[in-house]
Image: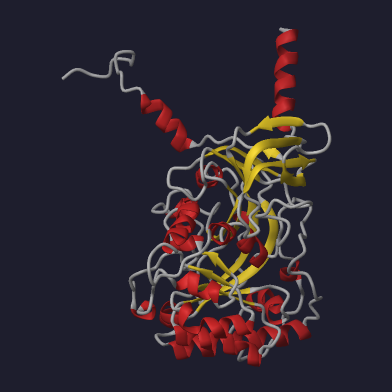
Amino acid sequence: MMRLATLLATAVCALATPAAAQTFAVTNATVATGDGGEPIEDGYVVVENGAIAQVGRGTPSGNYSVIDAGGAWVTPGIFATVTNLGLWDVGAVSESNDSRAGNSPFSAALDVAPVVNPASQHILVHRAAGITRAATVTMPSASIFGGQGALIDLGADPQAISRPRAFQVVTLGERGGRIAGGSRAATHALLRNALREAGSYGDGARIPAGGARADLRTGDDLPIDPRLAGRETERAGEALLTRFDAAALVPVVRGEQPLYVYVERASDIRAALALTQEFPRLELVLVGASEGWLVADEIAAAGVPVIADGLDDLPANFEELAATQSNIGRMVKAGVKVAINAAAMENPRNLNQYAGNLVALTRIPGADGLSWGEAFAAITSVPASISGMGGKAGVLARGATGDLVIWDGDPLEVGAMPVKVYIDGIEQPLDSHQSRLRDRYRDLDTSDLPKGYDW
């Protein structure tokens, strides 16, 4: 009994101890670095203590535990943006769905960091699809503001949040007009009022600069926004925002926190870009932008990045009448930094297939697609850069996080699947509820099942 108790105690300690980052080399691989270039044949990648140490062709220098890829593809992990990963389990069951807060008295103050569930089956499923990091946020519902999104990693550990309060979201266009009172005019009045109220409140409450991007945690390890603990309560009687909402928008007005603007129509895109004339410190990111190709030169001149829907070829509503599959290709050709929008698809795990379709567009006369390297960058290094992790995620480069995926084929081809996934240099499990159900029912022989009932 004593020996059994000792073994059980040892097992419990082993389960409680987080996995350590590994040091290893992957050789004999087709390496796609994610930087927009073409893949490297006979390449290698070295991971040391959770970070990328070497990338090149041939044989790495030094003594490492070696994984021979046998010519398989090795890439950085996919970076999914914008998503609601970790915020829901069953979409139709409201108790398990934190992706919207339609009855909340708050809007911009909504913060997903304390509610992300790292054990969500959606995180497990998408990790098995090669997605290692994501930007996740609640969607606008009661207000044009959806709240503050977080950057997360999809590792099998309880610490999913990489950066809380990484960005703020707002919706314009048709949806924004409906929420604000029935017209786009109401949306713009509400948005401008909110930004001005936030600017005044930030000065009056003496909110310090730079807090939005810091990973500040309380004693219980929940990344609660420290601005919401302020004691400033006296406000003008005509203020429309709650104190918490005003505080949450302060870093947006100061240019410390990017504002992700959901917008589709060309004229609405121009109106969003014009916001910087009134609020010059705004750091805008356009999301959706189905008609972005019509104003691509203006977007490029403004230096505003876009997280665009992958392959909108038919208008889903009036603000997308000029939708075309060539939208992303034409914006990239004009010099716009474009990532593929994960929110535009039912399953973000299909990001690599959407990227592959953009490569296929280059073979259609009159269409504008992306090269293989550009398309893969649109789901790796570009969304990482837009999210503030440029050079650290979505790329195989010295000093970047050790997020690595080994595939059984070209990752932009339909049917290609990861065989190994590493996050921060730690190999991740690839099983989920879906895979367990698949394995359970793969054998349809019912002879060994217990008797159920008789007719």
Q: Is residue 435 visible to the viewer in this orientation of the structure?
A: yes
Report the quarter where the N terminus lies. Answer: top right
Viewer-proximal residue among 206 and 261? 261
In the rendered view, would you say 355 is above or below 274?
above
Residue shown at 62% from the left, 71% from the top: 168
In the rendered view, would you say 279 is above or below 383?
below
User: Picture coordinates of residue 402 (x, y %)?
Assistant: 72, 45
User: Picture coordinates of residue 164 (x, y %)?
Assistant: 69, 61
When asked about the image quadrant of residue 253, the answer is: bottom right
Residue shown at 37% from the left, 79% from the top: 322
Q: Is residue 58 left or right of residue 352?
A: right
In the rendered view, would you say 162 is above or below 63?
below
Residue shown at 42% from the left, 63% from the top: 361
When asked about the image quadrant of residue 386, the answer is: bottom right
Report the quarter where the C terminus lies. Answer: top left
User: Picture coordinates of residue 275 (x, y %)?
Assistant: 60, 88
Number of labelled discs? Answer: 0
Viewer-proximal residue among 419 and 282? 419
Q: Is residue 348 visible to the viewer in this orientation of the structure?
A: no
Residue that sits furthest to the right in the current view:
62
User: Picture coordinates of residue 115 (x, y %)?
Assistant: 60, 54
Viewer-proximal residue among 391 and 5? 391
Residue shown at 70% from the left, 38% from the top: 426
When asked about the image quadrant of residue 134, the answer is: bottom right
Q: How is the image coloured?
A: secondary structure
